[in-house]
Image (cartoon, coloured by chain):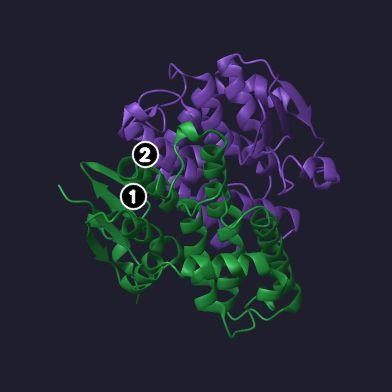
Chain colours: A purple, B green
């Protein structure tokens, strides 16, 4: 049975395609236009009762939540740990899990807030100031971590980097040139910027962004 | 070396204590008053650079993000799967991960929004309506899942239930009797209410709420 990925061009939606590119795993891509009411249709709610993307169906397993999907695919198709840590790696494995939770919560929330304000044209300086303080906080934490090494956990590019770069790319693309973009990003967060360039230099990353595009 | 838990009486803060109670694991409890500026002090930022709770230090491993801590403790101290699924359990293991991500993102966000509005005294009906629509969405998803069984994943009480009940309990305690509480909860979400009563009937759960209290 083939692995099927249901996704769309969003921060979370890019993640599984990047990983599958790195692992060279064949899959059927069901690409939704975005945004779309299709994800609330009955046939899709059977796959993902939460009506969100991405989801996968693989050998009878239906899974959603993008970072859960990364962990599942890495466990099944990356036995040698090319782009993931295994439970035997001890500390790095648990830091991998920890950073995936940080990504899905605080990191995504900081971006979401700016994105929502852009969508609803919020211009109140105090409100925007709070949102920028939030994004400042999460990028400072990431900057601190990237001072220890080139990648987020340990010494290799992993599903953690995949998880962050997908959302970061989406943020850059949707906010750049608007009043909602983080000013002087490359100067304030030079390690983050360097890390982003490194991640973007991988053709597996760029090709996934192109494949899962509007 | 002893396991040390740094925590406070919040939705995320209750989680590890409940699990440690079930597993009967001795630990040193560092209980912060709440809220507290202490979590931004240098000594604590060495344990958790993000300045949040909970965190654990165990055998040289420092870990934060409450659901990552649950997975770590379950892997290390619950080898027999008393309250957790193991990777050999297949689908249930991956659903466990999936629901932990759903809990930490959408479920927590829905509660946080109501909590923030309560704190800042927001009374605009349209704004509150959106927040209630969000909480309605996540509890509907949970209600749908609990129609399949007594607990959230599979047929036993697990770290997934621990994760949800901690935040749900915190929500009930902080919003009940205010205009921010979800009206007619027990009628609208009868399975969720039943599940909550079942979880609360475990003394390991109740004692954790009491131990980690303001």
Q: Tell me the residue at 25%/54% (across/down).
A: B25
Contact flag, marks 1 and 2 (Cβ < 8 Å): yes
Q: Is residue B113 visible?
A: no
Same subunit, tags 1 and 2? no
Q: Quadrant of the C terminus of chain A?
A: top right
Chain containing mark 1: B
Total labels drawn: 2
In the picture of the structure, the residue carrying the numbered disc 2 is A145
Circle 1 residues within 10 Å: few <14, some 14–19, many ≥20: some
Q: Tell me the residue at 67%/15% (across/down).
A: A26
Residue A19 image-quadrant placement: top right
Position of residue B164 measured from the top left corner of the image (x, y, whole percent): 52, 59
Q: Is residue B122 visible?
A: yes
Residue B179's label in the rendered image is none
Q: Tell me the residue at 79%/41% (across/down).
A: A44
Spatial distance from mark 1 to mark 2, Cα to Cα?
Answer: 9 Å
Q: Tell me the residue at 71%/65% (across/down).
A: B136
What is the secondary structure assignment of the residue under circle 2? Answer: helix
Nearer to the camera, B7 or B116: B7
Circle 2 residues within 10 Å: few <14, some 14–19, many ≥20: some
Position of residue A38 measured from the top left corner of the image (x, y, whole percent): 84, 42
In the picture of the structure, the residue carrying the numbered disc 1 is B49
Left or right: residue A105 compared with residue B45: right
Q: Quadrant of the N terminus of chain A?
A: top right
Chain containing mark 2: A
Residue B137 image-quadrant placement: bottom right
Position of residue A21 relative to residue B7, above or below, is above
């Amino acid at each position: 049975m083939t692995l099927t990925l249901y996704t769309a061009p969003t921060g979370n939606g890019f993640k599984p395609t990047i990983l599958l590119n790195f692992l060279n795993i064949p899959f059927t891509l069901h690409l939704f236009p975005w945004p779309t009411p299709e994800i609330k249709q009955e046939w899709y709610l059977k796959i993902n009762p939460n009506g969100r993307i991405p989801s996968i169906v693989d050998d009878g397993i239906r899974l959603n939540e993008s970072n859960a999907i990364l962990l599942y695919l890495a466990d099944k198709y990356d036995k040698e740990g090319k782009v993931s840590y295994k439970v035997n790696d001890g500390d790095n494995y648990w830091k991998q899990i920890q950073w995936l939770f940080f990504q899905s919560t605080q990191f995504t929330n900081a971006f979401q807030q700016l994105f929502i304000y852009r969508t609803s044209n919020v211009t109140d300086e105090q409100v925007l100031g709070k949102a920028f303080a939030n994004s400042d906080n999460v990028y400072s934490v990431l900057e601190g971590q990237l001072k220890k090494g080139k990648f987020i956990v340990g010494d290799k590019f992993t599903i953690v980097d995949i998880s962050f770069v997908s959302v970061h790319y989406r943020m850059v693309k949707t906010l750049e040139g608007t009043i909602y973009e983080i000013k002087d990003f490359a100067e304030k967060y030079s390690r983050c910027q360097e890390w982003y360039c490194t991640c973007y230099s991988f053709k597996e990353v760029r090709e996934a962004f192109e494949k899962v595009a509007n």
